[in-house]
Amino acid sequence: MGIAQAFEEIKHHVPLLDVFATYGLQPNRVGYVCCPLHTEKTPSLKLYPASWYCFGCGVGGDAVKLVELMENLTPIDAARHLSETYRLGLFPDKPLTTAEYKKAQEAKKQREHDRGILKNFDEWEQWACNAVAAYLCLMDDWKRNHAPKTPEDEWQPLFCEALQNLDLWEWLYNEVFIYGDFQEKLQFYKFYGKAVSDLAKRFDTGTKTGIA
């Protein structure tokens, strides 16, 4: 494989956000992070889907360029580092074994899945926020209006559901949609995306099964 093709493979298969995260760099809600290449208090480095640019120092590039600068490597060595980290097999010293090739393919599929998650994420986030907020309003109503009036009264299912789920979903709503950063929202999608979709189907708030 030629060098140019190897660089294209890295750009296509290595999630830039993940590379930034390896250096403890987490972008804010609008995709900015403090540039690690110079001292600053206000984030001026902007992340794009496959590239980045710092409006403070004027430096930018892709995942390879970031590793090159952070690790003081040549572009080829930075590309080799990413290839080994993400099991791309672009610069093998010897042919990959069957097991190594299988792992590389599995890692590739996971990266493609993660890229799909990033597609149209803002739209999904707004939809999910509205769906969870609607569920919270319903549960608050159930808790107030379906509470037993006496100890002898039978507990209604909706009241029980509110008791069981209200605190959890209220906490998730605040931690994810109010105070959460992009990575926390992404994790919410991975673990609770189906649950939110099921809620939307149940209460007919507009079904959106995924963001890919």
Image: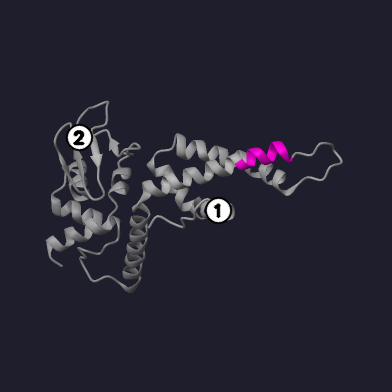
Q: Residue 37 bears which disc, if any?
A: 2
**Residue type pointed to by label 1:** Asp
- Is residue 142 covered in magenta? yes
Task: State which region is magenta.
Answer: 138-146
Q: The C terminus is located in which quarter?
A: bottom left
Q: Is residue 94 left or right of residue 138?
A: left
Find numbered disc 2 in the image and state the secondary structure of the residue it sits on: loop
Q: Is residue 123 left or right of residue 148?
A: left
Q: Residue 204 bears which disc, if any?
A: 1
Tell us which disc is closer to us: 1 or 2.
Answer: 1
Of helix, strand and loop, which mostly describes the magenta segment? helix
- Is residue 82 covered in magenta? no
Task: Give the total number of marks visible in the rendering.
Answer: 2
Q: Nearer the viewer, residue 152 or 52?
A: 152
Q: Position of residue 21 (x, y in %)?
A: 33, 43
Question: Residue drawn 30% across and 41% down?
Answer: 23
Q: Residue 135 bears which disc, if any?
A: none
Q: Position of residue 191 (x, y in %)?
A: 49, 52
Q: Position of residue 8 (x, y in %)?
A: 18, 59
Q: Earlier in the sequence, mark 1 or mark 2?
A: 2
Instruction: Give the distance between the C-alpha atoms of the residues marked 1 and 2, in whole angstroms.
Output: 49 Å
The extreme top residue here reads 41
